[in-house]
Image: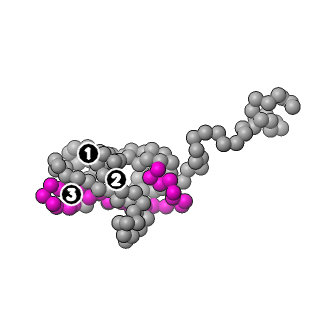
Amino acid sequence: MYPVTRGDTKTYSMGLTLGGIPYCMISGSSYLMTVKANVTDPDSAAIVQKTLGQGLTEQFPSNMGVTFYPIDFYYQTQSCPFYFDIQAIEPGGNVETVCFNTIGLSLDVTRSTGVSVTIYTGNPPYPSGAPYPP
């Protein structure tokens, strides 16, 4: 399982295998990563899809760099596992599933990157920068 927190940028180097052995990437292949809530969901219900240059980076000979961006899980409202696979589409037309795993999504608490409310300091609580005591 690869942990991801909603709203964060996270990059992983994922090993690719075929038949239990490292998959040797073939020059000219394309790759497609599909993330779903349920394995049986149709592809049209995918939460995220990534391709080379759009979140996937070849790491020869048998790894794939995968970057998750803040927008990828922005609309998710529950912490849960998501299922994903990476398919290699080889130049000759063969399609191979070279990675299958899960993403453990945790929800973020802070949804923006700025201060949203008045910050209080002191006892009793006074607004930051206010005369003490008022």
- The residue pinned by badge 2 equals 50
Secondary element under disc 1, as helix, strand or loop, is: strand
Counting from the top left corner in percent of width and height, residue 76 is at 51, 58
Mark nearest the camera among 1 and 2 is: 2
Inspect the image, locate mark 3, and give the three-letter code of the amino acid beneath it. Answer: Ile
Compare residues 123 and 27 and report the one nearer the observer.
Answer: 27
Mark yes or no: residue 86 visible.
yes
Query: Can you say whether 127 is above or below 59 in the image?
Result: above
Q: Which residue is mark 3?
A: 89
Q: Amino acid at mark 2?
A: Lys
Q: Amino acid at mark 1?
A: Glu
Q: Is residue 126 above or below residue 110?
A: above
Distance Cα–Cα, label 1 vs label 3: 13 Å
Residues at discs 1 and 3 in contact (Cβ within 8 Å): no
Rendered location of residue 32, percent (x, y): 29, 56
Can you identify the residue that label 1 sits on?
58
Decide which of tag 1 and tag 3 comes sooner along the chain: 1
Using the image, tell me which numbered label, if any, was put on residue 42: none
Magenta residue check for 86: yes
Question: Which range of residues does the magenta coloring cover?
Answer: 71-96
Q: Find out whether the residues at labels 3 and 2 contact each other: C-beta distance under 8 Å.
A: no
Q: Earlier in the sequence, mark 1 or mark 2?
A: 2
For the residues labelled 3 and 2, the Cα–Cα distance comes to: 13 Å
Determine whether 76 is above or below 25 in the image: below
Residue 124's x, y, as percent?
Answer: 83, 38
Colour convention? one colour
Label 2 environment density (alpha carbons within 10 Å; few <14, some 14–19, many ≥20): some
Nearer mark to the viewer, of 1 and 3: 3
- Where is residue 125? Give x, y as percent: 80, 38
